[in-house]
């Protein structure tokens, strides 16, 4: 069995003032390997055959080559990489049939799929409508106390935490009920973001319910909230199965009287939702752990109460609702510093190897988790572990134990009274034992991606190197789906990979009907991303916003070489991965960090790389202005607008006013603009002038597409400026 490469998991966050510098964004695509089957959104299923360098518009660029039926080939610039997605495959699946270039069959297939997603789209629109019609509570802007609370945080918040907090506050200050999913790994700071939202709610004289799936996690959240709010007059209660019926009755009575501001608890909170005097915010941790009835209660609550869900690996339905826009999503991908990656190995059961793993952990003074998939065989496994580790203090924990016995065992393990905890998957959420840095997951193929990911998150929560062993039996056939899950864990090794794993889980299990359990096989026909896009487009059309969903991909032909040279990035997979990231970057402010990462990894960037980023920035600005083509020719820079809808005359006048060069439009209903740069200007100078021009256009971009942030500065190629004599008034 192939062993996994090093995996990255984390615990809490950094020391004060230490800000993470990683910018590994969550990718929606897998790395492409020569021979992979892919779906092109315009041409259908083809086979990826690697990168080829072509001369386009007078300059060298890298192109993707796809093979199609009948020996046809398609080549297109890497700037269009987002138009393709890799098809998932396994040995049991049949080889996909290649499409015929120029055939109408692909468009017909998309039309058939689109008709079948109309029903889903209608249901989504109904959800939209309900949310829009119901008026919620608009929280006031931040108070002085809010700032004091946030400044009291002992760590420096990461950029992703800051952004997620800002998005949540904007939702809360809107009079439409919030429904936002915060996706981020264990230890990436989701709870701190939630506590800032809770504080905003409490200081608006409203109550907060924190709903968690397990008794253990409820207790840990309660302690975290108590510690964080200790300096402020906020009353917090805990409701879980360790409370007696009398204690619960008393708590709910006081909640209904408004004596408690925040209540942390398990699903018992749902049956007493009317006990709140004035519930303003519902925080849900790992919603996928709740049953069908609880989820129905949550769906009703979402229509009237601001709701904030948190998950490391959201279930397909939750993720799908976020991707299609019904639920807003915030990603926290910035990993903490001072955390070492968890080394994860997938192996067949070998008690000698497992005994060595346990011995290595205990010999450095650590503790060990051993997870079993069944309660019935857990005592037998505990005996095996005792035989592997003579003299070690072994405890057993599972959900069928008496409440107080389970609580006693868990507390004792956290305090270090036991060396090894043999348990079921009850440890997957919330348990924080920094001294436990080895975990053995027996019969790992019986667990889901989310469970495996969460259980792996129980270790590596300090600055000690941690180990996770995903153990499978020696003589048992493993299903194709289970193999895919383990391969997914093997593939996604970066810090913050929970989102990618959730995306892979969604592909493996099938997205299904967003509002039910029906599975749709046509995802395999058109690819997942194409399916999501078709659903989104259908929703936009039903809501009357079809025009805005059309994405513009400008052609930039400036006669310059813009590519990633093999001499700079020698590994082909790394090159295609960076091209994928660049093609899917949607914000101008994300380009400088990506460029900085390249230089950090590969050294100073050569001119071809700098020009690649230059062309990318120009194309991103042009797309927001609905410009479809940019070309340098005969001393002029010419750009062409999309014909439908035609450009706004007012915007055209504003563009001319801010242009640093003389500019004019062609024709009575102008679709083309021209800037005269001078016939003697070099290609490099024309490219730099184009960047200067389009950066000047940014303030004129309509508000619905413009970024509120200033345009970040990117490294530029040193060239000569156009001569003053060439700047004629237009």
Image (spheres, rainbow, N blue to C red):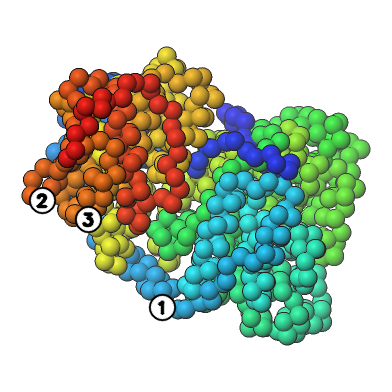
Residue at the location (38% across, 23% down)?
A: 717
- Of circles 3 and 2, which is in front? 3
Quarter holding residue 557: top left
Give the mark nearest the N terminus, 3 or 1: 1
Q: Nearer the viewer, mark 3 or mark 1?
A: 3
Q: Please name the residue that numbered disc 3 is placed on.
A: 650
What residue did someone put label 2 on?
A: 669
Mark 3 and mark 2 residues within 8 Å of each other at the beta carbon: no
SS assignment at label 2: loop
Place residue 348 in its image quadrant: top right
Residue 97: tell me if it is visible. Answer: no
Number of residues whose C-alpha sits closer than 10 Å to that of mark 3, classed few (under 14), some (14–19) or many (20 or more): few
> At numbered mark 3, what does the secondary structure look like: helix, strand or loop?
helix
Q: Would you name the residue on which mark 1 appears?
A: 133
Question: Please, is residue 75 above or below residue 547 in the view?
Answer: above
Q: Nearer the viewer, residue 686 or 333?
A: 686
SS for dot 1 = helix
Q: Quadrant of the N terminus?
A: top right
Tell me: 452 left or right of 175: right
Distance between mark 1 and mark 2 Cα atoms: 41 Å
Horizontal and vertical percent for residue 160?
57, 48
Q: Which quadrant holds residue 400?
A: bottom right
């Amino acid at each position: 069995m192939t062993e996994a490469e090093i995996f990255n998991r984390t615990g809490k966050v950094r020391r004060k003032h230490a800000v993470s510098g990683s910018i590994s964004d969550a990718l929606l695509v897998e790395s492409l390997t020569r021979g992979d089957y892919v779906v092109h959104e315009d041409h259908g299923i083809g086979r990826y055959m690697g990168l080829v360098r072509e001369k386009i518009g007078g300059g060298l660029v890298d192109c993707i080559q796809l093979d199609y039926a009948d020996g046809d080939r398609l080549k297109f610039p890497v700037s269009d990489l987002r138009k393709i997605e890799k098809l998932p495959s396994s040995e049991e699946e049949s080889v996909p049939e290649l499409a015929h270039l120029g055939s109408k069959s692909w468009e017909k297939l998309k039309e058939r799929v689109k008709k079948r997603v109309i029903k889903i789209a209608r249901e989504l629109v109904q959800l939209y409508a309900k949310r829009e019609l119901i008026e919620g509570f608009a929280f006031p802007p931040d108070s002085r106390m809010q700032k004091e609370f946030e400044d009291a945080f002992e760590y420096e918040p990461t950029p992703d935490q800051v952004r997620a907090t800002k998005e949540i506050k904007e939702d809360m200050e809107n009079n439409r009920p919030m429904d936002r999913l915060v996706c981020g790994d264990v230890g990436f700071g989701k709870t701190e973001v939630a506590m800032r939202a809770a504080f905003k709610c409490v200081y608006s004289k409203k109550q907060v319910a924190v709903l968690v799936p397990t008794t253990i996690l409820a207790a840990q959240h309660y302690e975290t909230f108590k510690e964080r709010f200790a300096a402020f007059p906020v009353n917090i209660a805990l409701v879980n199965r360790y409370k007696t019926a009398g204690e619960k009755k008393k708590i709910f009575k006081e909640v209904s009287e408004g004596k408690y501001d925040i209540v942390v608890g398990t699903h018992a909170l749902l049956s007493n939702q009317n006990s709140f005097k004035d519930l303003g915010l519902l925080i849900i941790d790992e919603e996928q752990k709740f049953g069908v009835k609880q989820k129905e209660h949550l769906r009703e609550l979402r229509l009237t109460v601001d709701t904030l869900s948190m998950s490391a690996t959201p279930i397909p339905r939750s993720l799908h609702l976020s991707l299609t826009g019904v639920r807003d999503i915030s990603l926290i991908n910035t990993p903490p510093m001072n955390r070492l990656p968890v080394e994860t190995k997938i192996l067949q059961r070998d008690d000698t190897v497992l005994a060595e793993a346990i011995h290595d952990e205990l010999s450095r003074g650590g503790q060990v988790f051993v997870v079993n998939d069944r309660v019935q065989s857990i005592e037998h496994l505990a005996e095996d572990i005792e035989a592997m580790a003579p003299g070690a203090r072994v405890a057993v924990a599972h959900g069928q134990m008496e409440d107080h016995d389970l609580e006693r065992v868990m507390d004792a393990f956290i305090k270090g009274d036991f060396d090894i905890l043999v348990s079921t998957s009850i440890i997957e959420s919330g348990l924080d034992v920094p001294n436990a840095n080895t975990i053995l997951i027996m019969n790992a193929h019986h667990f889901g991606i989310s469970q495996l990911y969460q259980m792996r998150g129980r270790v590596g929560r300090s600055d000690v190197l941690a180990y996770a062993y995903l153990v499978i039996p020696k003589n048992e056939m493993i299903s194709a789906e289970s193999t895919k899950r383990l391969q997914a864990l093997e593939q996604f090794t970066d810090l913050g990979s929970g989102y990618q794993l959730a995306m892979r889980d969604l592909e493996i299990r099938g997205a299904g009907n967003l509002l039910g359990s029906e599975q749709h096989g046509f995802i395999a026909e058109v690819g997942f991303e194409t399916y999501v896009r078709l659903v989104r487009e259908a929703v936009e059309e039903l809501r009357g916003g079809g025009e805005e969903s059309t994405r513009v991909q400008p052609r930039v032909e400036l006669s310059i070489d813009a590519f990633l040279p093999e001499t700079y990035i020698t590994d082909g997979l790394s090159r295609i991965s960076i091209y994928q990231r660049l093609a899917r970057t949607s914000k101008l402010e994300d380009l400088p960090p990506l460029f900085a990462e390249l230089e950090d990894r590969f050294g100073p960037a050569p001119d071809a790389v700098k020009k690649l980023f230059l062309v990318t920035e120009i194309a991103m600005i042009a797309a927001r202005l609905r410009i479809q083509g940019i070309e340098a020719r005969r001393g002029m820079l010419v750009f062409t607008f999309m014909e439908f809808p035609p450009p706004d005359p007012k915007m055209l006048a504003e563009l001319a006013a801010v242009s640093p060069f003389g500019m004019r439009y062609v024709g009575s209903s102008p679709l083309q603009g021209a800037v005269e740069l001078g016939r003697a200007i070099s290609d490099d100078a024309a490219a730099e002038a184009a960047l200067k021009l389009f950066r000047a256009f940014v303030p004129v971009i309509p508000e619905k597409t413009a970024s509120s942030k200033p345009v970040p500065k990117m490294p530029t190629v040193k060239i000569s400026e156009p001569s003053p004599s060439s700047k004629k008034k237009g």
